[in-house]
Image (cartoon, rainbow, N blue to C red):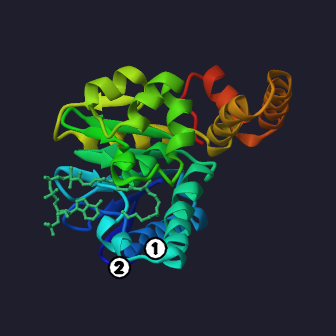
Amino acid sequence: MSDDVVTWTRHERVLVVRLASPPVNALSAAVAAGLDAAVDAFEISDARVLVIVSDLPGFFVAGADIKAMAGFDEDDMARYLVSLRRPIERIAAAGRPSIAVIEGQALGGGLELAMAATLRVAGRGARLGLPETRLGLIPGAGGTQRLPRLVGRGRALDLLLTPRTVGAAEAHAIGLVDRIVAAGGEEEAGLAWAAELASLPTSALTAVLRSVDDAHDLPLTKGLAREADRVADLFAGEDAREGVAAFLERRDPDF
Ligand SMILES: CCCCCCCCCCCCC[C@H](O)CC(=O)SCCNC(=O)CCNC(=O)[C@H](O)C(C)(C)COP(=O)(O)OP(=O)(O)OC[C@H]1O[C@@H](n2cnc3c(N)ncnc32)[C@H](O)[C@@H]1OP(=O)(O)O
């Protein structure tokens, strides 16, 4: 368990990470370190899904810690950038699904954290944006790379070039969030979604995640070849045997 700004608890096959760093969950060094420790806990566990949720009403994460950064020298900045990017990239590369539960503001590094998750669920009151240009910066934790992959070049530029934020409905319409729920229902929806994913075999979910990432990174022919290899590996595995048998025996599979 990390210090009190980032905590995590196990809910059956789901690890729930809670952010509670008043007033806005700014990504301070303590929050970054806490996130990293939470990813350590996820990696050594047999949890199948990671959920990231804020305990601060109105804020998912308001971005990097501007107050702290204002006093940085270049070495501090370099260390801070590494400390922020490390947990964010580990979540993205985890190979097991993660869900960011967005209630309120997800800005800058906060939206970058959410985009590193596999999936995003937002409440109707959420606002999302990458306002770094207003600080004379650009996103430094993957925002310029993941936003175009999620929403396309034009919409990404619209949100990257200006500090404009989008509400939940627009974010859902452009594919920045995957599910939109009534305000107040975010955490329940995120946990229910995580439980649904956690009932499925990690071997298949990991194969989906790796294959979809290949679709961005590889030429089609190589991606198709890797997909075929993954199908063959899965078909030879216990999970596929259980899944096929359960179907034929008209029962729920026990993965
Ligand atoms: C800036 C120096 C740069 C030096 C180089 C650094 C390079 C290292 C880069 C690291 C990796 C990059 C990560 C990421 O890409 C970069 C970022 O995330 S930059 C930050 C982006 N986020 C923002 O710009 C949001 C700024 N905040 C707001 O717009 C508003 O505060 C809000 C979140 C919309 C809330 O508005 P209100 O409800 O009106 O509340 P207040 O504005 O009064 O704020 C309340 C309280 O919280 C403090 N606060 C708000 N945001 C931050 C923050 N990001 N960091 C630290 N503190 C924040 C605010 O100051 C108030 O404090 P109080 O006055 O009450 O003490």
| Quarter in which the N terminus is drawn | bottom left
Say which element carries label 1: helix
Q: Which residue is mark 1?
A: 33
Q: Amino acid at mark 2?
A: Asp
Task: Assess disc 1: are there few (<14), some (14-19) or many (≥20) residues with their C-alpha within 10 Å of its C-alpha.
Answer: many
Residue 203: x and y, percent? Answer: 68, 43
Q: Is residue 117 above or below residue 11?
A: above
Residue 242: x and y, percent? Answer: 68, 35
**Dot label at residue 181:** none
Task: Assess disc 2: are there few (<14), some (14-19) or many (≥20) residues with their C-alpha within 10 Å of its C-alpha.
Answer: few
Q: Amino acid at mark 1?
A: Ala
Of badges 2 and 1, the one in the foreground is: 1
**Which residue occupies 38% across, 43% down?**
130
Q: Quadrant for residue 172, please give it.
A: top left
Q: Nearer the viewer, residue 144 or 251?
A: 144
Q: Is residue 34 visible?
A: yes
Q: Quadrant for residue 27, please give it.
A: bottom left
Q: Quadrant for residue 208, please give it.
A: top right
In the rendered structure, which disc, 2 or 1, sits on the residue that comes first in sequence?
2
Q: Nearer the viewer, residue 144 or 4?
A: 144
**Dot label at residue 3:** 2
Q: Quadrant of ligand 1?
A: bottom left
Q: Nearer the viewer, residue 98 or 45?
A: 98
Q: Is residue 130 above or below residue 14?
A: above
